[in-house]
Image: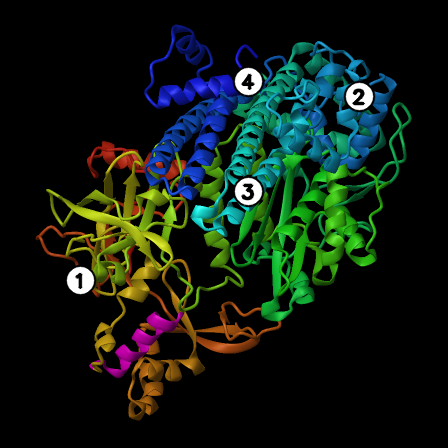
Amino acid sequence: MPVGIAPLAKIARASTEGRQLSPEEQKALRVHANTPIMAAALCYAELIADGEAVISELSSDSAAASRLTRLREGLARQRWTVVGKLEERHKAALTEAYRPRNAPDCLDALVLRHLAFDQFQSALNSVLKSRGLRTDAIDVPRRDLWGWLARNGATATLDTTELPPGVQYLRQLDQKSFLAALLADANNAEVGAALAHEALIERRADSARDVTARLLKARKAVERELLKVPVRLRSQRQFARLRSTAEAYARGSARSLLSELKAAELLLRAVQAHGQKRSQKLRAECLRAAAAAVTAAAPELGEEVVAACAMHRAGCPQAKQSPPCVDCAHGVADRLRPQIRVYTSGRVAVGSPAARPAMATRGEQSSMVPVTPIVNASDSFVCDEVLRRVAGGSTTLVAVVETHHRSDAGLFGFSWISESGELRTGFDNASNAHDGAVRALCKAALDLDDDSLQIRLVTRDAKAADVVQGVMRTGTVVEEAQPPLSTRTVELLLDLIERRPRMSVHVDPCLYPHQGATAAQQLAVLALRAGQGLEASDRVRIEADQLSREVSQGVGGKLIGPGEEGEHAWWLNDESRHASGLRWCLAVRRVHLDEEWCPIPGGWVPGAWLGRRFRLHLNHQHAGPPGTNRANEVVLGRRGGQWAFGGIRWPRSLPPGTLVTFNWQLEDTRVSAYTTRLLFPEKIDGVEYSHRYEPQVVTREVALGLAQARGVSDLSDASWVLHTLRKLGYLSVDGTATLAEEALVRNCIALGLPQRRADGLSVVIDQLLRSGRIQRVQGSLDLDGRPWCPPRPGHVRTALLRYVPRVESVTASRDGGFPQSDRAGHWVAGFVRRLPPGARASAEQIEAHRDAVRAHELVDRDLPEGFTYVRRHHRAR
């Protein structure tokens, strides 16, 4: 490197402090701007300043500590900016590299690979072996990138055996010894020549988190020792030790960051090399040869695949692109799979057709995987038969695991989702589809591990389930499994052994996927695309949020009990910190309005800012323009263990539940906040909302009988029932509140209903049910008394009472008034409606909105994000 990390960090620090730079230093900053070495240098300078700030604080030099904290924050913002630009540049280049221009059409072979993976992989391995190639020769490399590049002549060193002895030694070390070498390196000012070699970049990147975590732990240990000593007795030797551990942490973190960025560059080089014409031609030849071998063994399958691919090409817009139909193989295979089930055993030899495999059509049974179609499979979370086997009350958690594998990339996306809407998505490397499916089950099991729960994983991959369940049953891992498992997957299986008493894996045998499998599969596909740089991570988060809400409102959806709602404040940017500042959203509660404060979601805020005053500008539009943009002074402080702004003068027209978005630039003394108007106001049980709101908070905070808090019992019996349901019922995401019928009376009394009026509540409940104000539904109670609806197997069935908010759209009629809610059937003009968070309008709805604009039925503007268009329709009374 022309300039090392430490010298460049010194220049960056001087620039941030505003010192005069020499021409050579200015040139160094220009040359290395937005490069990995600059990101590492800024990281080093930032953490050195952080260590100095800690030392100053422990030395009781508050002025120096404050100055160094500001310096660290300035360097951190620069680092975020540089890393962000590098990631965007890498993502764009990777997206381009994953679409090689010279890729031949291999749709038939890839579809066949999805439908008969084991047989296809066996034939492909035979083809590769006959050509003297490794099994990973034609796929996009994901592991040992340098080795792949070396074997394909894309590095200066053509063979790993030509590496220097020191590099070969480090490559052969086990993980514990390699980590020890990295920690020793972090304590030296000069990086070892062997560790700096390109062949070790990937392994250094994989160990980056462990290295930084251990170095930070060492620094914190010295800090704690110093804190135990009175200030006047703290020696220079102790401070020198703290400075040494702080420098090691800064050095190790900077080198780890550089390794991660360099590993990303290595991946880009490998993908670009794989996309070259020579590599793509070789890949196509091998895939077609393997497909020919499988087709010879199963001619009916081959004919079905050829016909399906021809039909697909006729109507696919990607068919004329280069490369053609690059992302279509999985979709074509999914459409074929319900009609064709192929199960074969043994290996298919190239040039020697094996016996024709057994064919199983819809409704037929296979000896390997039972095919049992059920009606309306998608309406249930998992197969009812599976649910009966795994039911175990409130101590059992059921989660569905799905994967999506792309063999040419050596990458798979995975996702698991539980009945309550908990989920995780991600992507990882795998040697084959089976390896990825087993690893996904392991990841889900480890994610959900809880001493108080019995974890039941459900998958549609019978072979992967057999492997994991075999480990759970026997406590041993068979490393010679076929298809082979990677070392990483074997390690995860070993981690599961000690958890096996509380975990099990089950196969969903149904032909059609249920709700859980459908949601998990969608997220696995998105995760894989995000891993390839073809999909934004924001899209994955939005889809995950939407699917979580849909699943949690379905079978067995877990409801939120009283006191479990939290603050209803969440971050709107990644990890609560971003180069552009902090952004969060708050559903305003009555306590915020009454006591004039707002919480900041849990996260990092500079400790030196405690008590600092800021100027808050709150933009809140009333029923008509212009809106109110009021400003007042607020104070940053701690409230109940969390950060908060105090002294906020909220608008009087702001009802509880309204969503307020905050923006705070860390270097600025101003904080802005705003509410967002609804296109049409809505009335929720008679209370009008003109701005976006959180239904759960509205149900809780705008319940009837707020005077009860002041000891005034002025409610009717009917109002007492509604008030209790809203205050103590279990909430769903749309604000619906559910409570066991037998618990309603005692909860009314707990809230203040006089005992003498309790006997009359049964008559009142019947009246409310007849009027439609509340609903009676069949549900169940778990061992903790928590209601579930619909009822879950193994629970005690009981009748539940449900409050559903009455939401009405407030639109002006032609005579200037508002339509009556109880009028007869009528035609409703087309209008724009708000969608649930994360949802999007369909292409058909967007086009219908444009037609309405052209017909002058709506204001001429685009359909806003998060809204959909509802056509003109007739509404019954």
Q: Judge left or right: residue 375 versus residue 737.
A: right
Mark 1 and mark 4: Cα distance apart in space:
56 Å
Q: Which residue is mark 3?
A: 523
Give the image location of residue 510, x and y in percent.
68, 53
Mark 3 and mark 1: Cα distance apart in space:
43 Å
Residue 321 is marked as 4
User: Compared to 717, does 440 lie above or below?
Assistant: above
Range covered by the magenta-colored residues: 714-729
Mark 2 and mark 1: Cα distance apart in space:
71 Å
N-terminal label among 2 and 3: 2
Q: Secondary structure at mark 1?
A: loop
Residue type, mark 3 in image: Leu
Mark 3 and mark 4: Cα distance apart in space:
26 Å
Q: Which residue is mark 2?
A: 289
Mark 2 and mark 4: Cα distance apart in space:
24 Å
Q: Secondary structure at mark 3?
A: helix
Task: State the quadrant of the N terminus.
Answer: top right
Mark 2 and mark 3: Cα distance apart in space:
33 Å
Give the image location of residue 636, x and y in percent.
28, 48
Residue positioned 40% across, 44% down in the render: 604
* The furthest residue to the bottom: 756
Question: For the residues carrying marks 2 and 3, which lies nearer the camera in this image?
Answer: 3
Q: Which residue is mark 1?
A: 820
User: Compared to 331, does 98 lie above or below?
Assistant: above
Residue type, mark 1 in image: Gln
Q: Count residues near mark 2 (Cα–Cα under 10 Å), then give few for <14, some for 14-19, many for 20+.
A: many
Q: Is the Cβ of the residue at disc 2 closer than 8 Å to that at disc 4?
A: no
